[in-house]
Structures are given as C-alpha cells and as structure tokens.
Amino acid sequence: MTCPQCRAWSEQNSVSCSRCGTSLPGSRPDSYDIPDFPADLYPPSPSASQFPRTPGEQYLPDNRAGQYIPGANASSRQFRPDVRRLTQVEQAAGGATLIVLISLFLPWFGFGANASLSGTAAHGYLVIVALLAVLMTGYLLQRSGRDESGFRLPVAHETLLLAGAGLQFAGVVIAFAEVPVSGLNREYGAYLALIASAVAGGAAVIAAIRSWQARR
C-alpha cells in the first residue's frame, strides 16, 4: 500500500504510514452501515403484563407497545348469585320454601304402599302454592345476586317476605287438613311440606320483627 503523502510503501492493512505517520485510506471504515429492518420484523414477545390479572379485566392489545390496557371493572350491578349476601333468616326462609316446592310433588296421601297421590294431584289449588314458592325462591335468588336491587318495591322487603310465607303456610295447612278421599293415609310429603312451610313462615316473622325494632 502506497502512502498518498510521501509515496512510501507500507504493508497491507496498515493503519498509518510507517514513514510519515499519515493515516492510510481504507485501513478502517469511517462509519458502519447498519441495515434498516422493518419495524414489524421482530414483534415484541408477550410478557406477563400483557394478559389480564383478574377475571374482571379485558385483554385490549396496544399495537405500539405490545401491552394490554386494563378494561373497566365489572359493573357493580352485574348479577352474581351469592347466598352469603342474604341474612340467616332469609336463607332459612328461602331454603324452607324450596323444600315446600319439592314436597308438593311427593306422595301426600295413599293406601299403604300400593298407591299414593302427590300434593298437587290430590289438591289442584296447591299449584298456586307451588307458583308462590317459585316466585319467593326466585325473588330471594335475585336479591342475593346484586348488591343493590335493580327496582324499588312498593312495600318493604320484610312485609313482602312475610306475606308470601304466610300465604304459603295457609295453603299447605288447608291441604294437609283436607283428605280428598275417606280412608286415605297421609304420606311423608304432606308432613314435610307442613314443617317446611312453618319454618319459612317463622323466619319471615322473625325478619319482620327485627325490621320493626330497627325502625323504632
């Protein structure tokens, strides 16, 4: 390699002239050319923060950073049944009402072990009691599924519960006392309905008394 300044010869790949010290051209690049790669050639890898941390959050991708944006929290009015939101008295009333509903379709009257009649078959009006039990159970289930009721009742909650449980108990007592055909024996379904309706009615009475005492 020839020095451009003094024309002296230097070895190949020499950094400077061995005679005058002038830097030799081509000995090292003044700059490095870095190829331009497309921005989307190497997408960002997913990380733990890219995914929702709780069921209430939603995955919303951010194309700029490859991250997620936490979604809005679930609405406080979202329906999620939880019997723990009910008081113990309401739980007792709801559970007993459900037992009443089931017992109406069990044997109420029969001739020993050969033939039997369910409550609704022996007394057609017990269908009204069954419908009332369904409404009461559904009402308490709806009450347990929301922190706040979605509608305003025309009467107090305790009054409504007491009225429903009282009508249910009255219907069961009348059907229990009335034997459709002479000679029939009462079966376990009749006794189960009577006891369960009494428990539901007693729980409703306790709820009404506590509400009345709290307003004093």
Image: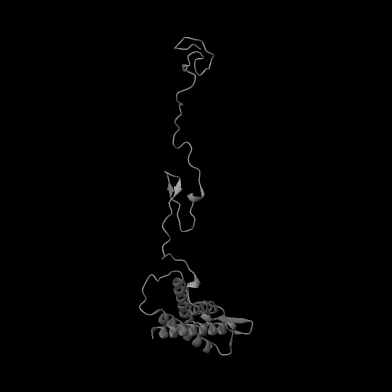
Point out the residue furthest to the top here: 7
On the image, the x and y values in percent for residue 52 come to: 48, 54
Whole-percent x, y for residue 137 in the image:
47, 75
Q: Position of residue 77 (x, y in %)?
A: 41, 66
In this rendering, the answer to whether 24 lies above or below 168 is: above
Which of 173/121 is in front? 173
Q: Left or right of 67: which side holds 111?
A: right
* Residue drawn at the location 50% of the way across and 87% of the way down: 173
**Along the line of sight, which residue is nearer the eye, 127 or 198?**
198
Residue 47 to residue 84: above or below? above
Q: How many marks?
A: 0
Residue at the far right in the pictured view? 113
Tell me where residue 93 appears, x and y as whole percent.
49, 79
What's the colour scheme? one colour
Q: Is residue 92 above or below residue 70?
A: below
User: What residue is rendered at 44% in x and 74% in y?
Assistant: 139
Which residue ends up furthest to the front in the rendered image? 20
Location of the C terminus by quadrant is bottom left
- The front one of 154 and 36 is 36
* Depth order, front residue of 23/117: 23
Name the residue at 44% across, 80% down: 161
| Above or below for 7 versus 35 | above
